[in-house]
Amino acid sequence: MQKLVLLRHGESVFNQEGRFTGWTDVDLSEEGFAQAKRAGQLLAKHGYNFDAGFTSVLKRSIKTLHIVLEELDHLWIPVTKSWRLNERFYGALQGLNKQETIEKYGEEQVHKWRRDPNEHPPAITKDDDRYPGKDVRYKNLTGRELPLTENLSETMERVLPFWGEVIVHAMRESKQVIICAHGNSLRALIKYIDLMSDEEVTDLEIPTATPWVYELDEELNRIRHYYLE
Ligand SMILES: O=C(O)[C@H](O)COP(=O)(O)O
């Protein structure tokens, strides 16, 4: 039986401040660093080892994975970073305080922006400093791939090719894989793996730095999943 571990990064500075983050490249908070270390210790305690790691191009996830692998004394394994595992691009909400946004637009609208898989947050324009086309790390993305806003369905559309072509390929080689990513890129992946409906995924909340384990059969079909405690 093969296991796959999904891990949301530790608490970020924006999580701590209650701000929409998306592709904003904020660091872990002090608590986030500690959470990442605890996640690594927990995985070590349960005897987990990995042959390959996958993460986004955002430092809160990169650092979380690094800390976890350090705890496992597995810093040497190959780690592949891809923008496709980035957090959902939160458009013009990025940087705004979530509570203030609720006060301005109402609970219902903000909940839709956050959790309705087909609802777009307000878009930015290309002259906005937050436009990823201005960031060198995205220089190889096509115009269509550079988001101005993103809903969960669109996040799924860019996460799934990486899952299908790269991660599944590694798992087929019997590699034990850890994916360290973000609340919404992981929700996109879990929606796909667990065949969740739009309604079901609306209620899925993923805590920071808490390993989510899939047990898979030889055909990589999901047997069950659980949080590691
Ligand atoms: O991008 C963000 O703000 C968070 O990582 C996830 O936020 P959410 O839970 O509001 O979708």
Image: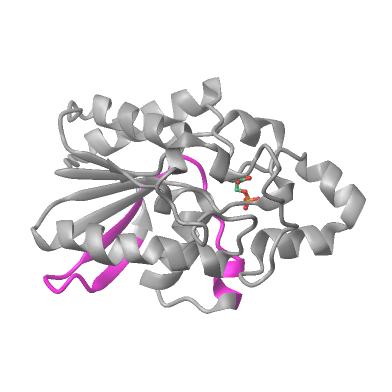
Residue 25 on the magenta span: no
The quadrant in which the C terminus is found is top left
Q: Quadrant of residue 205?
A: bottom right
Residue 148 lies left or right of residue 181; in this view the side is right
Q: Is residue 122 above or below residue 138?
A: below
Residue 46 lies left or right of residue 141; in this view the side is left
Q: In percent of the image, x 27 and y 71: which residue is there? A: 222
Residue 214 on the magenta span: yes
In percent of width and height, residue 21 lies at 63, 41
**Residue lying at the far right of the rendered structure:** 104
Residue 172 lies left or right of residue 133; in this view the side is left
Q: In percent of the image, x 26 and y 26: which residue is there? A: 71
- Judging depth in this view, the residue of 13 and 128 nearest the camera is 128
Q: In percent of the image, x 76 and y 40: which residue is there? A: 96
The quadrant in which the N terminus is found is bottom left
- Judging depth in this view, the residue of 61 and 10 nearest the camera is 61
Query: How is the rendered protein coloured?
Result: one colour
Q: How many marks?
A: 0
In percent of width and height, residue 210 lies at 42, 43
In percent of width and height, residue 25 lies at 54, 33
State which region is magenta. 199-225
